[in-house]
Amino acid sequence: MEGNDIIRRVDFKIGYQDQFIDLPEILSTGVKWQILSIDNPNDNQYITFLNDKYVNTDKAADAVTHRFYFTYKRDVPIGPDPFIFTVNFGQFLNGRVIGGKTICNCYIAASPPDEKPVIYLYPENPMDVTVVLDYREVIDYSYPSYDSSIGGWRVTAYPDGTIINNADNQEYSYLFWEGHGDWNYDFSSGFVVKGTDTAGFLRDKLSLIGLTPREYNELIVYWLPKLCDNPYNLISFQQESYTDNAALTITPTPDSILRVFMASKPLSSPIDVKPQTLAPFNRQGFTVVEWGGVLVR
């Protein structure tokens, strides 16, 4: 694997359809199938399957969940056009292959990146802080560099938000990272916002939640160009669907922590959605604030 490749994971169930892999229902459920090989019939130069890394992870009575890994070039991200490939399955009995199936025209669908989560640290006094990010998927970018040996960053933080990264002794305003998360986001409640109203909406809601003008203006500057030209946007601020998949462990333990993660979907026309209730955040003592987002299409 080359240095600019990204390892991605694909999960799917035989006989089912989910957001990653579309399999025609020609394999019966309840049968213990295993992947024999994965072929790239179009010989796409941007994707390579790592066949030796696949595993079976769930052998339920009604389905078999398979997992395999592949790489793609960093400068040619997946989507919106899928990569077509072939999966060859075998049915095993006492360690021997007794039957086989070939599934063609499966595809790897695009998955949205978790964009620009940034972490601000505000101790009451200068403090050495360790931030560990347990992200379920692969981190594509970070600044300062994510230290895989500790799973995060070791820094000295100051009351005004200034951060000195221990690894390079350089000054930073926050900790930045970005990765791709293959999970579902919760749009059961939220807000439908005209694209032209995006800046005012974000300013009002983020101020209500508890971001400072510095923090919410940095979020708006990043996200406004991605949202303002859409006729409408469905916007929902995530809770467990984000925090359970990108867990933070911070030492010393903060007195208060706010994690704002905005999921948005472009809309051609307004839809009905249950209004989301947002609770204000009270800053006390050593405070940690994070914001980020994802654009789901």
Image (tube, helix red, strand yellow):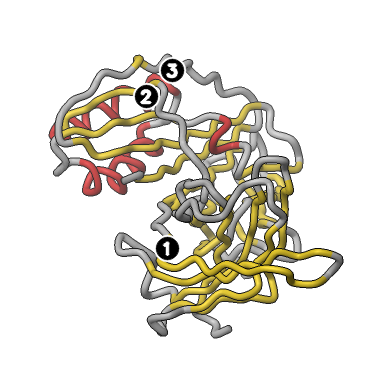
- The residue that label 1 is drawn on is 107
Q: Which mark is residue 207?
A: 2
Q: Secondary structure at mark 3?
A: loop
Of pointers 1 and 3, the one earlier in the residue sequence: 1
Instruction: Measure how far apart labels 2 and 1 are at the Cα level.
Output: 42 Å
Q: Which mark is residue 221?
A: none
The amino acid pointed to by label 3 is: Leu
Q: Secondary structure at mark 2?
A: helix
Q: In this orientation, which residue lies closer to the viewer: 250 or 34?
A: 34
Depth check, mark 1 against mark 3: the one in front is: 1
Residue at horizontal 34 percent and vertical 62 percent from the top:
79
Where, quadrant-wise, is the N terminus in this rendering?
bottom right
Of pointers 2 and 1, the one earlier in the residue sequence: 1
Instruction: Measure how far apart labels 2 and 3 are at the Cα level.
Output: 11 Å
The amino acid pointed to by label 1 is: Tyr
Depth check, mark 2 against mark 1: the one in front is: 1
Residue at horizontal 55 percent and vertical 82 percent from the top:
3
Horizontal and vertical percent for residue 139? 56, 60
Up/down of 88 relative to 268, above or below: below
Up/down of 231 relative to 94, above or below: above
The reply to whether the C-beta atoms of the residues labelled 1 and 3 are less than 8 Å apart is: no
The reply to whether the C-beta atoms of the residues labelled 2 and 1 are less than 8 Å apart is: no
- The residue that label 3 is drawn on is 278
